[in-house]
Image (cartoon, grey):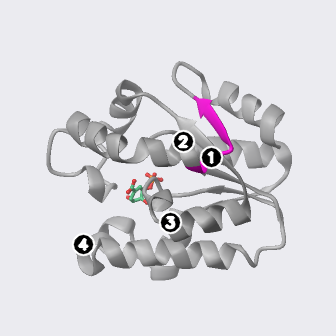
Amino acid sequence: MNHIILIGFMGAGKSSAGRLLAEEGRLSFVDTDELIEARERTSISRIFAKRGEPYFRDLETETLKELKKETRRLVIAVGGGLPMREENRRLLKELGTVVYLQADVDTLAARLDGDTTRPKLQGGPLREKIETLMRAREETYLQTAQKVLNTTGKSLIQTVKEMERDVL
Ligand code: S3P
């Protein structure tokens, strides 16, 4: 099944753009974080706090394996850290077309300011945290995606229109 999968940093707009793209293409939308929260019946923050990050990362891999059984074509938004595991990158490629929603650090910092739901960004200067994580991740995002879409300076509608044209 050739699903459309959106990867990228926290705050890049994967869920908002994915939801809208699915609507436009009359596809179903799923978000791996939401699937995990529903399965565990608790929030991502609590999963990190109570069970630790490795447990959460295993849930991400399990979720991708579950999605391979899906028969409807989907738009799938995945958590920002999910592509960092090699097994997940293989699963993503098997699931369909991977799109990297790219955004610059200023845009991300503005969008993530005041966020309390993302454990990887708590307790320290936000901008530095974003820069450090981005440095560790960007190359992997670029190598995993078949399509890179720079969203900086674009509205949500513009981003979705580009994806409709290129990957729908
Ligand atoms: C994470 C990103 C989050 C969520 C978790 C960890 C990360 O998803 O999976 O907080 O490591 O980048 P979003 O990218 O949807 O915010």
Q: Which residue is mark 2?
A: 142
Residue at 54% across, 42% down: 142
Residue at 14% across, 45% down: 124
Query: Disc 1, disc 2: CB below 8 Å?
Result: yes
Q: Which mark is residue 145?
A: 1
Element assignment for label 4:
helix
Residue at 53% across, 40% down: 13
Quarter of the image where ligand 1 sits: bottom left
Whether residue 157 appears in this view of the structure is yes
Which residues make up the magenta segment?
A: 144-150
Residue sticking out furthest to the top: 153
- Given the image, on which type of amino acid does mark 3 rest? Glu
Residue 147 colored magenta? yes
- Given the image, on which type of amino acid does mark 1 rest? Ala
Which residue is nearer to you in this view: 78 or 45? 78
Where is residue 134 drawn, in percent x and y?
36, 41
